Amino acid sequence: MYIPSFEEFILLMKRGPQIIYPKDIGSILIAGNINKNSNILEIGTGSGALTLYLNLILDKESQLFTLDESKRNQRRAQKTIERFLTSSKINNNFLNVNYINTNLSNFSFKDIADEVDTIITDIPEPWEFFMKNKIEKNLNWVSYLPSITQVEKIVIKLNEHNFINIKIMETLNREWIVDKKIVRPKNEMVGHTGFVVSARFLSN
């Protein structure tokens, strides 16, 4: 029986909101310095592609919170995780995702701040986080955004709140053909899908 890879599963899975592509998930993991011991708040569950991969790499003792104002999105994400683990024959009993069903205007970060060392946002206006919430501990920040105007706004806000090491990147994915005497790039490539903005906050 053919077992789909994570990339194949994500690109073909049922979805609602636009997914984060596998190439960008890789960039997010590196930019956020994410490892098995990370404790993460994901703002914007969406279709659950990133939620799924975080679930796969985090240790059972880690914390994964995912916030979305849509219960439908969160139910979809939960089913996506269960479907992938079943189809891939992966024995992963983590599945302890903490779903927070609210929007940023009603969300209080201080309630979980002690349990989080990384924030990842996949929403159109991540700067709204700072309207009500404040960072007071060492923390990694990553925002995934489709447009450079959104990038500009979050960078301004991160600077205002004394974040350091602010970096902006995008990942372009081009496959190559190597077949006997043919060595060339494929005609199609996965170009711009989003910007990854990363930063760090260090408490005094």
Image: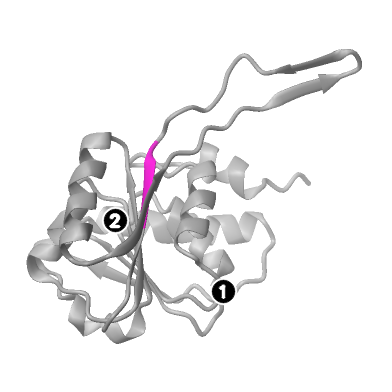
- The correct choice, above or below, for 89 with respect to 190 in the image is below
In which quadrant is the C terminus drawn? Answer: bottom left
| Secondary structure at numbered mark 1 | loop
Pick the front one: 26 or 158: 158
Q: Main secondary structure of the magenta part?
A: strand
Q: Is 123 part of what is drawn in magenta?
A: no
Q: Nearer the viewer, mark 2 or mark 1?
A: 1
| Range shown magenta | 194-198
Outermost right residue: 180
Left or right of 56 on screen, residue 74 = left
Q: Is 196 part of what is drawn in magenta?
A: yes
Q: Residue at x 31, y 53 (%)?
A: 73
Q: Residue at x 18, y 66 (%)?
A: 161
| Secondary structure at numbered mark 2 | loop
- First of labels 2, 1 by sequence position: 1
Residue 143 appears in the picture as rendered = yes
Q: Amino acid at mark 1?
A: Lys
Left or right of 23 on screen, residue 178 = right
- The correct choice, above or below, for 179 with respect to 113 in the image is above
- To which residue does mark 1 refer? 36
Pick the front one: 156 or 86: 156
Q: Residue at x 91, y 17 (%)?
A: 180
